[in-house]
Image: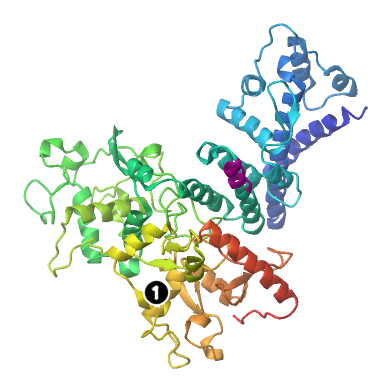
Amino acid sequence: MNTSTSPLAQLAQAASLIQSATAALAGQEPAPGHAAYFARLVEHLGEQLVRAQLHAVDALRRTGAHQLDQDSFQAISDAGLDPSPAELAAINGRTTMGRSYYGNTVDLLHGWLNIPLTTARERVHQAEALIAAITETGTRTDPLMPELAEQFTGKDIDPRLVTSAARQIRGAKKDLGTGPGAAGAQEQLERDAITLIRDQPQSARKHMNRLVEQTVAADRPLEALIAESGLYRRGLKRGLVTYQLKLLPQDAELLESVFTQIDNPKTIAGNRDALDALVATRYGPAAPPNGTGPEPAVSAPWGDPSDMPAWAQESPGDTPQLPAMVPDARPEPGDLPGETGTGADESSGTASQAPAQDAHAPEATQPVCTTADTGMPAELSLPLEKVRPEFRHLIALIELIRGAGTVPDGKRAGSVTPEVMVILNYEKMLAGATDFAITANGLPLTAGEARAIMCQAKIYPEVLGSKGMVLDFGRARRLFPKHVGKAVRAAYRGCSYPGCTMPAHRCELDHLEPWENGGTTDVDNVDLYCKIHHLARHCGLFKVVKVEGCRPMVLLPRDLDPPQHLRVNTYWMTPSEAIEANKLAEEATVLYKAGKLQPFAA
C-alpha cells in the first residue's frame, strides 16, 4: 500500500472500529471506571474529528474534488469502510472539464455528504481562517487568522474552542472595518482568545462573545446606540406576544437588579406568600361561578370574560384544556445576563452539573400539566423560587409596571427597589482605561454611563469599605455582618469554584482560615461559595490559596488538574478582568510550586 492511500485505510479502519466498539459498549453494563473512560475517549475523538473535518474541507478545495465525474463518486461510495488496497488505488478519481454535479466545495458538502448548507459554508470559512485561504485564481495563501491557526494544530488545546473563537471574530469583521486599525483589533482579539482558551476553557466561549461585543461597541457613538435601543413588539405567535428589548448597560442594570431580587428566596421582594397567591390568582383558573370560594386579589389579565381562553373559564371540577408549551415559547439559555440557563435554583451551580432547565418545569415539547386539586398549570402550583427563572423575571417586571397586588400588611407583592452597584477600578480609572467600571451583575460601563448611573442611583459607599465602615472585626464575632457580605458579593459576583455559574446572591460566605482555628471575621479571610462547593471544600475535595490583589484561588485535585495550577473562577468577570486574573494565577502558581504559598485548611 502506497503512502497516499495508507492514511485513508487507517481512517476507514478507525471508523469501522468506532462503530463496533460503540455497539459493544452499548450492549453491556461496563464498570463505572470503564464508562468514564469511554466518555473521555469519545470526547477526545470529538476533538480530533473537528480538526479532521476542516482538513478534509481544505483538501476538497485545493484539489477541486467537486469536479469529479460520476464514475469517481460511485467508486468512492462502493469502497465503504473496509476497502481493499486495490479499491483504494482505484478511487484516485477523475475530474471533468464539462458539467459536474457540484459547482463548488459547499455544494459538494451539502449535496453529496448531506451536510446542512449553513454548516457546509461555515466549515469552508473555518478552513480559510485556520488552515489556508484560497484566492479566486486558486492560489493558496496563509490562513486569515494566523495566531488562532497555530493553536488549532496544537495537541494540548481544544480545537472546538478555537473554531468557536474564529467564528465569533469573523462575525465581527464588518463592524471592525478595514485598514490597519481593524487588523490590529483582530490580532488583539486572537491573542486574548488564546489566553482565555488556554487558561479558562470552561468560560472561554462566554468571554469571547463579550470580548467581541465590547471591541465592536467601543467605537460606536452614543447616537448609534440610542438609534437601536427601544422596546420592539414582534407580534403574536402561538398564543404569546413577543417583545424585543434593547437597552444601554446603565438601564439594563436596573432590570438585572430586579431579577436578582426576585431570584433570591432569602430576600424575595415584597410579601412572599402574597406573591405566590398573586401569581396563582392572575394566571390560574377563574373563581367558581357560584360565588363560593375566595375572590381574586387582583383582576384576571383578560378585561372582557369573553376574551378569556377556554381553560380559564372552566370550573375547578372540569378538566381544563390548556395550550401546549412550544419550543419557541421559551428563551434560549443564557439570553438574559446573569442567567445561565442551567437551572441554577436546583443545580450545584456548575455548568457541567446543572440540568438544562428547572427539574420541576414542564418539558418544552410536552403539553402543560395540571394539578388535580386546583386545575392550574403545574408550574404555577410550585413555590415561586421553583418556577422557571424566565417566568419569575416576567412576574417581577409586570408587577413593577402594574403597581398592583397590595396585601393587608401594606406591602406590595413583587415590589422591588433596584439597587444599582458600580464597581470602579481606581488604578484603571487614573490610567484612562475604558473598562474601569462594571456593575455588580457584570455589565461593563463606559465612563459616561458610569457617571450617569452614579448621578441617579442609590450609592453604597460602604460596600467597598470606605471611611466610617469597619470591615475588620478580628475575632469579636464569628458570623459576617451584612455590609461585609454585601462588599464581598459585589466584588466577587459569584462562586469561587472554577467554572461555577452560581451568582453571588445564592452563595454563602466562608472563612478561609476556619474561625475555630483562629481565623478572623474580615474581608481578608472570606470567600464565596455556592452550597455544593462550600460543602465540597470542607470535605477536602479542593483547596484554597489566598493571593494578594486577587480573589482566593482554587487548587483542584491531581485527577482533575495534573499540572496543579492555581485557578480563578472568571465566569462573572469581564474579559479584561479574566485575562488579568489568569496572569495573576500563573504568577501565583510559580510561587505555590516554590513553596511560598500554602493552601488553607478546610
Task: Pick the quarter of the image with the N terminus.
Answer: top right
Residue 590 vertical placement versus 72 (above, below): below
Q: What's the magenta region? A: 180-187
Which x, y percent locates residue 320? 23, 41
* Foreground pick, 188 / 257: 188
Residue 181 lies within the magenta run: yes
* Foreground pick, 278 / 333: 333
Q: Residues within 10 Å of mark 1 (few under 14, many from 20)?
A: some
Task: Pick the quarter of the image with the C terminus.
Answer: bottom right
Which x, y percent locates residue 546? 60, 77
Q: Can residue 229 be seen in this view?
A: yes
Which residue is tagged 1? 486
Which x, y percent locates residue 21? 75, 41
* Foreground pick, 439 / 91: 439
Q: Quadrant of residue 72?
A: top right
Q: Is residue 20 left or right of residue 397?
A: right
Residue 563 lies within the magenta run: no
The type of residue carrying mark 1 is Lys
Q: In this view, does 12 lie to the left or right of 520?
A: right
